[in-house]
Amino acid sequence: MTVLHLADETEAADLAAFLTRLLRYDRAAAVRLQAAGTALAVFGRPPSFEVLAVRAVRLAKPYEDGLDDGLDLTVSAGELLESVDERAATAAVPAAVTGPPWAGVLPPRGGWQAEPGLPGPAVLHRTVARSVAEFRSRTEELAPEERTRAELDRIGREIWSREVGSTRLPVRAVHAAHSLGFLRPPAPDSAEETGLFSSGAWLRLRTPYGSVAVRRAGLGALGVTVR
């Protein structure tokens, strides 16, 4: 069995927290793992947000068990979570599973360029809070016979598809970053800041704790899908 040696207990705890949040939205969630050298990228797709979440994990040393090339496979998020040993800072890689469609369409590794206009973390937090409050208020105002799944989805699409500030980033991407624990107050000693980047058809909201990527469709507006 391939064993990943994480950089420290904090990296192991953060990986476990990310997997736990993904499983909260989908108990059968899968994640795609890509590892090279001492870097591991964990990709997941929480269905409620229609975005791609990326958690970068530092490894203490390259993965073991005779693998000479980069590790790249899709596994069960639940099985991976069960294998995480926070005290030992290790994780055993589960058997590969048949990946969902999104796992075959990942953002590029390079070519990212900074995009202007992204508000600071405090404004992003307020944007999410206002959007959640608006959704609750509008749905609570509906008469019981009008509170159908189709109507709730329509209201949700209207609110979460709005763009943040002067960017092309949909609010749902910021909501996802907040819900997955990526959008936090900046650490005092952290030199890395929240930023928005683009590469080809992709937009990526990057924070010191993880990234959320959305793929633009050729429909004029930003179509959020990774299918």
Image: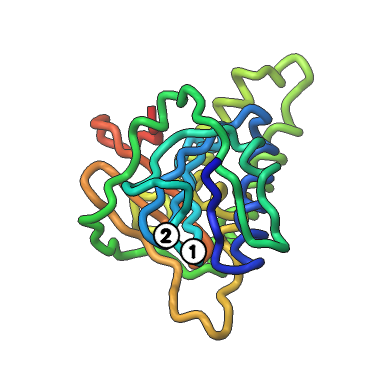
Q: Which residue is mark 2?
A: 39
Image: 72 above or below 3 = above
Image: 111 above or below 156 = below
Q: Are marks 2 and 1 in contact (CB under 8 Å)?
A: yes
Residue at the spot 28% in from the left edge and 52% down from the top edge: 109
Residue at the spot 75% in from the left edge and 14% down from the top edge: 145
**Total numbered circles:** 2
Q: Nearer the viewer, residue 188 or 30?
A: 30
Question: Residue at the top extreme?
Answer: 145
Q: Quadrant of the N terminus?
A: top right
Q: Amino acid at mark 1?
A: Arg
Residue 207 x, y percent position in the rendering: 47, 64
Res 150 seen here: yes
Q: Which residue is mark 1?
A: 58
Residue at the spot 71% in from the left edge and 21% down from the top edge: 147
Residue 7 x, y percent position in the rendering: 55, 67
Tell me the SS state at disc 2: strand
Res 156 seen here: no
Residue 96 x, y percent position in the rendering: 50, 30
Label 2: few (<14), some or many (≥20) within 10 Å?
A: some
